[in-house]
Image: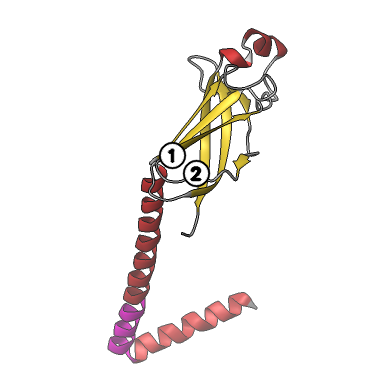
């Protein structure tokens, strides 16, 4: 049934193109041109919005470190956030990973499970919190984990998202 509609539509279009070539051509150019202008305009607006979000997000400085001086053994990962956006951060979601030196795959990773904090961080201030060590990767061997304990790893925030207050 769907194929019949396509055949019928194409047949009508070809008939109009043969009967009224100039008008059908002009109509087709107007429709295609309008669609391109609207489509490209919409795409451009969304690209600009995403670009602005990334510019603002780049002014949030975030770091992670294994730190038993500031944190206890149950929550040894110190995450520090400095807000230089000019807006108040209302919520933060982040993912942590622990890497061996000179390796690109993490031994420990929060994966898709994000750490989340509702700590309010006004503009031009910093906040820190201690977090639990993420789980070891499922494919990491016991020997590798034993040879590279969490305190010997390089800790990174691999992804983060922030929400701003409406004020």
Q: Label 1, on which residue?
A: 125
Q: How far separated are the C-alphas under marks 2 and 1?
A: 6 Å
Label 2 with label 1: CB-CB less than 8 Å? yes
Q: Which residues are magenta?
A: 20-31
Q: Is residue 67 above or below residue 134?
A: above
Residue 20 percent location from the top left of the image: 33, 91
Task: Mark 2: give few (<14), some (14-19) or many (20+) Cα within 10 Å.
Answer: many
Place residue 49 in its image quadrant: bottom left
In this view of the protein, which residue sits in the foreground, 100 or 86? 86
Q: Quadrant of the N terminus?
A: bottom right
Residue at position x 31%, y 78% from top? 29
The secondary structure type at the circle numbered 1 is strand
Q: Is residue 10 above or below residue 134?
A: below
Q: Is residue 83 left or right of residue 20?
A: right
Residue at position x 32%, y 71% from top? 37
Which numbered marker is on residue 82? none
Which numbered marker is on residue 121? 2
- Secondary structure that dominates the magenta span: helix
Residue at position x 46%, y 50% from top? 88
In this view of the protein, which residue sits in the foreground, 12 or 159? 159
Residue 101 inside the magenta-drawn segment: no
């Amino acid at each position: 049934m769907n194929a019949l509609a396509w055949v019928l539509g194409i047949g009508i279009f070809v008939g109009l193109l043969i009967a009224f070539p100039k008008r059908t051509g002009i109509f087709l150019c107007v429709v295609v041109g309008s669609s391109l202008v609207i489509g490209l305009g919409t795409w451009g607006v969304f690209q600009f919005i995403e670009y602005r979000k990334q510019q603002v997000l780049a002014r949030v400085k975030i770091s992670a470190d294994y730190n038993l001086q500031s944190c206890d053994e149950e929550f040894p990962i110190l995450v520090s956030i400095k807000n230089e956006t000019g807006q108040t951060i209302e919520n933060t979601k982040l993912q942590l990973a622990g890497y061996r030196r000179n390796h690109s795959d993490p031994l420990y990773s929060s994966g898709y499970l994000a750490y989340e904090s509702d700590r309010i961080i006004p503009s031009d201030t910093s906040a820190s919190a201690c977090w639990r060590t993420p789980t070891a990767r499922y494919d990491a061997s016991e020997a590798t984990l034993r040879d590279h304990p969490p305190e010997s790893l390089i800790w990174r925030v691999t992804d983060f998202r922030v929400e701003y207050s409406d004020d």
